């Protein structure tokens, strides 16, 4: 069976080369955000490459497509007991590792491989495609306890309309249904090394319209979306693990977002973004509580420089007002709406009111693509570099929270043989720039095994060592909360298997 145009990305371990046959499809797929079907995960070690199948040829050419991505890791954190008894080992083993790398916090680096599986099913023709996406962040067979909140099940259900013939040099795409949008994407085809959108992620039911207008070497981009949630945690619900610690004091949320941009010769794209997430639900605020909102205003620059690599830089201003009642309809830096912003950035005394100035960037370069005059297709040795960073300045009335946060990293991958690549990554994280005792760094050498230069499989053997400060803090308990009494692991060994199709 012929395969339809894929909505997802294929993640490769050692090359960022785009095949010639994919160039036309890649140009059509460009937008100011990331398509809903792209995995909600950080890039694998090395470069990335999109995968496109054969598109439908017309309205009567109906096709079914199935594609997906998974990473299945074994992770072991290593620590020591202070005073082991005679029948205890001094070495202790933890899974997951007890390290400062929780996805919702600023300390998240994505260095620790996490379980992830996504399956995209689609059926349609050249005009309309129905999409159903299944997603899970764990596999039950390996877990010590069952966590329903990690089994997301049917995560996205939506229709995509492709309308290229509305006018000369005009192209429109419309998504209708339940899906996520992501803006501020630091990677060329994925969420980047941190797996964190710089602007925000929206989650809900509604619509998203993408328009592109071609004017010689200039392309104008216009996007608009409106999404809302389909339910609310009912009053009286006990917050617990089985319901993902749902909060009855969070209201039904809505978000309106608009975006505009200018692209120059498929080389540079400048975008501006505005998102307004809000809740006006009296069941959450009560008769006297104020309505809440989270507003995001940002701008970014993307340079796709072919053999000279890919650069992304962006900045955003997040203004939260009484955001306690705002749901995860808007996720800023992977947080769960207003309560997540309060816990991780604004502080409990802020009442959900404050500002975040967020800035970051990433630059990727393939030496083989730079130096080979005949063009590099990922079919030979390569050295791939990536440097990246992200910072946050917090302004709030709660003076107990950190006002400046910064993290920087670099990664290099040497693709040695068709079946072997070696990689090393270094991250430095400052959760509070003013207090060095909270800082930590981590270095992660890796060996990457695969079945060919451009294989769709990857097995990664990784060792990581953390250089922790005196007050480096990890989260513990259920739900997880920062716990200064926990001594973090300093070492981790992991073996992870990944495949994409």
Image (spheres, rainbow, N blue to C red):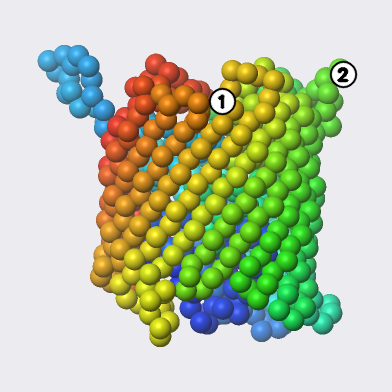
Q: Is residue 8 visible?
A: yes
Percent across and percent down for residue 234 are 73, 27
Q: Is residue 358 left or right of residue 88?
A: right
x%, y% of residue 232?
74, 33
Viewer-proximal residue among 122 and 226: 226
Residue 352 vs 155, above or below: the answer is above
Q: Earlier in the sequence, mark 2 or mark 1?
A: 2
**Residue at the outermost left position:** 86
- Mark 2: which secondary structure? loop
Q: Of the numbered discs in the image, which one, if any, rests on residue 402?
A: 1
Q: How busy is the neighbourhood of tag 2: few (under 14 within 10 Å), some, or many (20 plus)?
A: few
Marks 2/1: CA distance?
Answer: 33 Å
How many C-alpha atoms fall within 10 Å of the one at disc 1: few (<14), some, or many (≥20)?
A: many
Q: Quadrant of residue 272?
A: bottom right
Q: Which residue is mark 2?
A: 287
Q: In percent of the image, x 51 and y 73: which residue is there?
A: 306
Q: Nearer the viewer, residue 107 or 372?
A: 372
Local secondary structure at mark 1: loop
- Whether residue 110 is situated above or below residue 354 in the rendered picture: below
Residue 3: % across, % down: 55, 76
Seen from the viewer's position, the closer of residues 142 and 92 is 92
Residue at point 46%, 44% (across, down) = 408
Are the two marked residues, 2 and 1, in contact with CB atoms closer than 8 angstroms? Answer: no
Q: Can I make out residue 119 in this image? A: no
Q: Residue at x 14, y 18 (%)?
A: 87
């Amino acid at each position: 069976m012929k395969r339809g145009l894929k909505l997802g990305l294929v993640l490769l371990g050692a090359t960022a080369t785009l095949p010639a046959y994919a160039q036309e499809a890649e140009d059509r797929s460009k937008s100011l955000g990331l398509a809903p079907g792209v995995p909600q995960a950080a890039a694998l070690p090395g470069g990335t490459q999109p995968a496109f199948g054969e598109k439908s040829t017309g309205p009567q050419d109906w096709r079914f497509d199935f594609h997906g991505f998974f990473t299945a890791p074994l992770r072991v954190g290593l620590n020591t007991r202070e005073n082991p008894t005679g029948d205890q080992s001094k070495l202790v083993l933890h899974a997951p590792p007890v390290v400062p790398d929780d996805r919702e916090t600023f300390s998240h680096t994505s260095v620790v491989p996490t379980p992830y599986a996504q399956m995209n099913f689609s059926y349609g023709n050249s005009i309309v495609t129905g999409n159903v996406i299944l997603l899970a962040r764990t596999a039950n067979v390996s877990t010590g306890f069952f966590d329903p909140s990690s089994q997301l099940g049917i995560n996205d259900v939506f229709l995509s309309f492709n309308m290229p013939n509305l006018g000369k040099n005009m192209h429109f795409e419309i998504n209708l249904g339940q899906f996520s949008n992501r803006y501020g994407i630091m990677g060329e085809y994925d969420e980047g090394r941190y797996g964190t959108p710089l602007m925000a992620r929206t989650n809900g039911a509604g619509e998203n319209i993408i328009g592109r207008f071609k004017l010689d070497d200039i392309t104008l981009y216009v996007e608009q979306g409106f999404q809302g949630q389909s339910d609310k945690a009912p009053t009286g619900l006990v917050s617990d693990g089985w319901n993902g610690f749902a909060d009855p004091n969070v209201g039904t949320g809505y978000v309106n977002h608009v975006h505009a941009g200018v692209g120059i010769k498929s080389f540079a794209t400048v975008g501006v973004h505005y998102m307004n997430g809000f809740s006006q639900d009296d069941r959450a605020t009560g008769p006297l509580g104020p309505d809440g909102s989270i507003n995001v205003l940002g701008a970014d620059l993307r340079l796709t420089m072919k053999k000279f690599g890919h650069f992304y830089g962006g900045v955003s201003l997040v203004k939260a007002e009484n955001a306690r009642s705002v749901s995860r309809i808007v996720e800023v830096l992977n947080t769960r709406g207003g309560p997540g912003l309060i816990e991780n950035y604004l502080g409990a005394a802020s009442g959900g009111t404050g500002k975040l100035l967020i800035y970051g960037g990433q630059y990727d370069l393939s030496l083989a693509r730079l130096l080979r005059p005949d063009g590099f297709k990922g079919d030979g040795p390569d050295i791939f570099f990536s440097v990246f960073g992200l910072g946050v300045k917090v302004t709030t009335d709660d003076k107990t929270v950190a006002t400046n946060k910064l993290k920087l990293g670099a990664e290099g991958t040497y693709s040695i043989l068709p079946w072997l690549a070696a990689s090393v990554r270094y991250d430095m994280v400052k959760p509070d720039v003013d207090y060095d005792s909270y800082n930590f760094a981590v270095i992660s050498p890796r060996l990457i095994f695969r079945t060919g230069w451009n294989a769709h499989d990857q097995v990664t053997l990784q060792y990581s060592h953390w250089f922790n400060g005196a007050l480096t803090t990890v989260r513990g308990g259920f739900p997880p909360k920062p716990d200064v009494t926990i001594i973090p692991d300093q070492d981790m060994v992991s073996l992870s298997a990944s495949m994409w199709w």
